[in-house]
Image: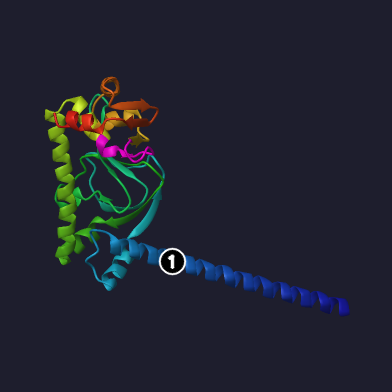
């Protein structure tokens, strides 16, 4: 009888301990959920499109949006597809590009955290005209077309902010078109290297371009890899650069500026 009472007491304590652990897990999950909610709301409030909204409006917007996680290589849309959502990039990188009939790739933008994409069909174009693909593990806030259109109607400041983003992207495309039409491949490559260059380690004078293969540089310019290979060789022979594997050291930035402006 005594032994039975001891077992019963032990079992009761075990149950109480399990209940405490359950409660702690539940509290942790609740805190984690609340942190995710607050974090998403903070992200929306800081975005270029929604920064004009009030706290109550951000809270409502938070309820209408969804955060999704995508793997590298995920294609969000293709040319000719109807646009149904607006994407806001929270983390990661997304590349916008076109493909020619012979398979050449032209990168028009590489988006980083805070950028939006997929906006063109939502302002009258109807369908996408490019590819959008995740380069990294990316977390993206998704908003339906219906909700975006309703918000644009009710909030002129949001519509204006979206138009400014579209305008900036069109200016970039126009610049890219002009360079493609009127500049040589050497001039365009020199311009691209200067844009991608980061400060080096030698007294801050040497600049380097990290992380781009010849194929990736060709995609940025919309040319064949062989064209980039020839241009890099010529720039090397001129003493302007030292190319390596996904690493280009710029020795003479002034020469690149001269070539870029030719």
Q: Residue at the spot x=34%, y=65% of the render?
A: 41
Q: Residue at the spot x=26%, y=70% of the render?
A: 57
For residue 172, above or below residue 188 = below
Q: Position of residue 84 (x, y in %)?
A: 25, 51
Q: Position of residue 192 (x, y in %)?
A: 24, 34
Secondary structure, magenta segment, majority class: loop
Q: Is residue 202 magenta?
A: yes
Q: Position of residue 214 (x, y in %)?
A: 33, 27
Q: Is residue 248 magenta?
A: no
Q: Residues within 10 Å of mark 1 (few under 14, many from 20)?
A: few
Instruction: Give the color scheme: rainbow, by chain, secondary structure or one colour.
Output: rainbow
- Quarter that holds the N terminus: bottom right
Looking at this view, is 19 or 188 the one in front?
188
Q: Position of residue 121 (x, y in %)?
A: 19, 49
Q: Quadrant of residue 12?
A: bottom right
**In the image as oriented, which residue stretches furthest toward the front?**
203
Q: Residue at the spot x=75%, y=73% of the render?
A: 11
Query: Going by the image, does 73 lie left or right of 8?
Result: left
Decide if residue 35 is in sight here. yes
Mark 1 falls on what kind of element? helix
Q: Quadrant of residue 94?
A: top left
Decide if residue 99 is in sight here. no
Magenta-highlighted residues = 194-206
Query: Going by the image, does 105 lie left or right of 71?
Result: left
Q: Quadrant of residue 235?
A: top left
Q: Which residue is mark 1?
A: 35
For residue 90, above or below residue 190 = below
Looking at this view, is 29 or 144 the one in front?
29
Query: Going by the image, does 97 lie left or right of 24?
Result: left
- Quarter that holds the C terminus: top left
């Amino acid at each position: 009888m005594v032994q039975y009472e001891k077992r019963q007491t032990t079992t009761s304590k075990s149950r109480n301990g399990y209940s405490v652990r359950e409660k702690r897990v539940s509290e942790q999950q609740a805190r984690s959920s609340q942190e995710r909610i607050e974090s998403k709301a903070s992200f929306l409030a800081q975005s270029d499109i929604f920064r004009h909204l009030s706290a109550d409006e951000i809270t409502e917007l938070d309820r209408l949006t969804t955060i999704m996680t995508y793997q590298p290589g995920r294609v969000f849309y293709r040319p000719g597809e109807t646009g149904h959502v607006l994407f806001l990039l929270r983390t990661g990188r997304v590349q916008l590009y076109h493909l020619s009939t012979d398979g050449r790739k032209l990168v028009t933008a590489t988006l980083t955290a805070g950028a939006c994409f997929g906006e063109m069909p939502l302002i009258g174009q109807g369908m996408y005209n490019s590819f959008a693909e995740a380069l990294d593990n990316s977390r993206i806030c998704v908003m339906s077309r219906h909700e975006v259109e309703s918000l644009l109607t009710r909030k002129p400041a949001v519509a204006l902010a979206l138009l400014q983003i579209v305008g900036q992207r069109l200016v970039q495309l126009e610049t890219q078109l002009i360079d493609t039409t009127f500049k040589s491949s050497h001039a365009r490559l020199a311009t691209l290297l200067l844009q991608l260059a980061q400060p080096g380690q030698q007294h801050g004078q040497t600049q380097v371009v990290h992380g781009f293969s010849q194929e990736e540089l060709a995609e940025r310019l919309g040319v064949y890899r062989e064209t980039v290979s020839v241009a890099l060789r010529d720039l090397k022979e001129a003493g302007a650069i030292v190319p390596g594997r996904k690493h280009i050291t710029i020795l003479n930035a002034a020469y690149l500026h001269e070539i870029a402006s030719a």
